[in-house]
Amino acid sequence: MEEIKLFERGTAHTLIPLFAEKIHAGFESPAADYEEARIDLNDYVTKYPAATFFARVTGECMVGSGIFPDDLLVVDKSLTPQSGDIVVGIIDNEFILRSYYVKNGKEYLMPDNTYYKPIERTETTHFEIWGVVPHSVLDQRRRNSARINRFEQLLR
Amino acid sequence: MLALIDSNNFYVSAERVFQPELRDKAGCVLSNNDGCAISRSNEAKEDLGIKMGTPFFLMREKQQAGQLWWRSSNYTLYQDMMRRITAIVRDTFPDQEIYSIDECYCDLTTFKCHDLEQVALKLRQRIFQYTGVPVCIGIGATKTLAKIANKIAKKKYRETGVFYMDSQEKITASLKATEVGDVWGIGARYAQKLIRDGVHSAFDFINLPEDYVLKLMTIQGRRTYRELRGERCISMEYERPDKEGISTARSFNCMITELAPLEEAMACYVANAAFKMRSQKSVTGKLMVFAQTSQFLEPSERYSRDTVIRLTSPTNDTATLIKEAVKGLRRIFIKGYRYQKVGVELRDLRPDTQVQAAMFDPLAMERKNKMQQVLRAVDNLNKNFGRDTIRYAAMGYEKKWAMRQEYLSRRYTTRIEDVIIVNAK
C-alpha cells in the first residue's frame, strides 16, 4: 500500500485529519486550533511532482551508494545534474544507473564500484542524462536475511 | 496575445520517453483495436510516407522488415503525460485552457513581459527537459492565429519550436503561406467552394468582403474571418462544463452473433461509463443503448438500433445501470445478425447532490448511503490497483470480444509494477 501511494502524487494524498466526530456541546476539543496537515512523504522526496518519475533497480553496481537490486528510485527530471549526483542515464538505448562527475569541463559517468573505470562523454561514447535520483527507497525487510547471515558469521 | 502549446506527435513522443530504443526510428501508435496509425514519428511520415489512418495491414511488411515500430494506444500513459505538461505550462502561463490531450491555449494578456518569445523558448525547453516530450508554441492575437503560428513553428522552426506572430509583416506572410483548407474552422466543403472562387490562401480569404463570407459560410465562417483579422471571437474556456452525456462504445475484434457476449461487453461499457460519471459527481436519469453490425456488410446483413431507457429515479449505481442496459439490449437484439459494436450513453446527467432524498423512507436512505460507500470503495480499488480489480459478474472474465491491443507498452507512470527498469550492472 505504501508504495502505491507514492505513485498517486497529488493533493489527495496530503491528508488533513479532520475531526469527524460530533463535538459535544460544552467542551470544544482543546486541540482543534492546533490541527496541521499530516506529513506527506511526497513533499519530502520530490520538489517538482510534474517532473518526478519512478524507476526500479536491477544489478548491484551502486551498492556503494546504498542502492540495492529491486530498490525503488525517485527520478527528478527537473534537477540539473551536479558533480557527485546519482543519475539515470541512457547509453546504447538502455537506462543505466551511475554517479555523475564533472571535472575540467568534462563529464563522466561511473559505477560505485572500484573495479570499473569512469566513462567520459565524448563524440563516440555518447550518453544522455535522463534524470537525477535525489532519493531511493530501500525495503529494509528484504535485506533481513543478509543481515542475519552476517550476524551468524560473527557468532561463529 | 494567445499561445497554443501543442505536443509534437504526442503519442509517439510519450512512448519514446520510456523506451529509448524507439528514438530516431520510424514508428507509430495504432488506433483502438490496433486498426490504423493515429500518431506517427517524423521518420514514419517523411521516410515511409505513413499517413494518418494508414491501415495496419499496409504497414505490416515494413514492421516485419524492422523499418517500423508500432504500439497500441496507451491512453493511461498519455493522459498522465498530458497532466504533467499542462502543470508545467501553468507555472509560466497560469491562464490556461486544456483544449485536447495534446494541445492547450494560454491567455497571455495579463502576462507582463517584454520578451514573450524568450519566455516561450524557455518554457518549451523546460517541458522537454522535465517530461521528455517535445512541444511547439505558436503565439498570435487570436486562437485561430495562434493555431496558424503553431503550425508554422512545427514546419519552419523545428529547432527552436516557437513562432511569435508579433508584427503585421509576419501575420501577412503566415496567412499567405497557409492554404485556406488548413485554417482552423474552415472545413473541407467550404475550402472546396472557396478554392473554386479563387480563394487559395488564408490571406486571400481575409481580403474577401465580410458580407460575402457571411453569405457563403454563415456566422461560423464570419467568426473565423474576424479571428484571422485579429479580432478575438473565440474566447477561452477555462472550466470545462460537465459532459452532457457520457458514452462508451467500442468495436469488437470480430463479429458476434450470440447475445451472451454482447451482454458482457455492454456490462463492461456501462461499468466504465458509470465510473466516469461518479468521478464527475453526477447521476444519470436516462440511458441509451445501441447495437449495430458493420456498415460495410451487404445491405440485407446490416442492422443498427438503439433504445432509450428512462430510470425511475436518477442513479450512479453500476449494478442498477447494468441491469437496465442489458434489458434494453435484449429488447433490440435480433438473432441472425453479426454484430460489430454495442454501446451505452448515460444521459440526463445532473449533480449527485440534486438527487431527491427519499425523505419518508429512512431505511431506503440508509441503504442508499451504504451503496454509495461500496461504490466509492470499488472505485478507489480500481483506481489504485488497475481497472477491473473489482468487477461485476455480468462483465465476464475472458473478454474474447475485447479490443485488440497486442502492442501495448507498460503504464510507466501510474503503476508501480510498470516503472522503468534501470540497469546498475
Image (cartoon, coloured by chain):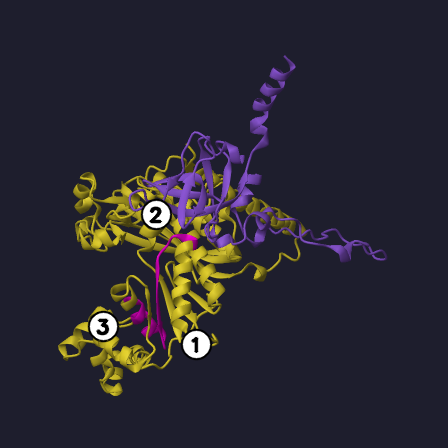
Left or right: residue B215 compared with residue B278: left
Q: Is residue B122 magenta?
A: no
Callout 2 environment at 10 Å: few (<14), some (14 to 19), or many (20+)?
many
Q: Are marks 2 and 1 in contact (CB under 8 Å)?
A: no
Q: Is residue A67 visible?
A: no
| Chain coloured yellow in this rendering | B
Disc 1: which chain? B
Picture quadrant where residue B180 is located? bottom left
In the image, what residue type sits under mark 1? His
> Residue B15 has which mark?
2
Callout 1 environment at 10 Å: few (<14), some (14 to 19), or many (20+)?
few
Which-is-in-front pick, marks 2 and 1?
Answer: 1
Disc 3: which chain? B
In the image, what residue type sits under mark 2? Glu
Q: Is residue B82 visible?
A: yes
> Residue B178 has which mark?
3
Quarter occupied by the C terminus of chain B: top left
Q: Is residue B132 magenta?
A: yes
Residue range highlighted in magenta: B130-151
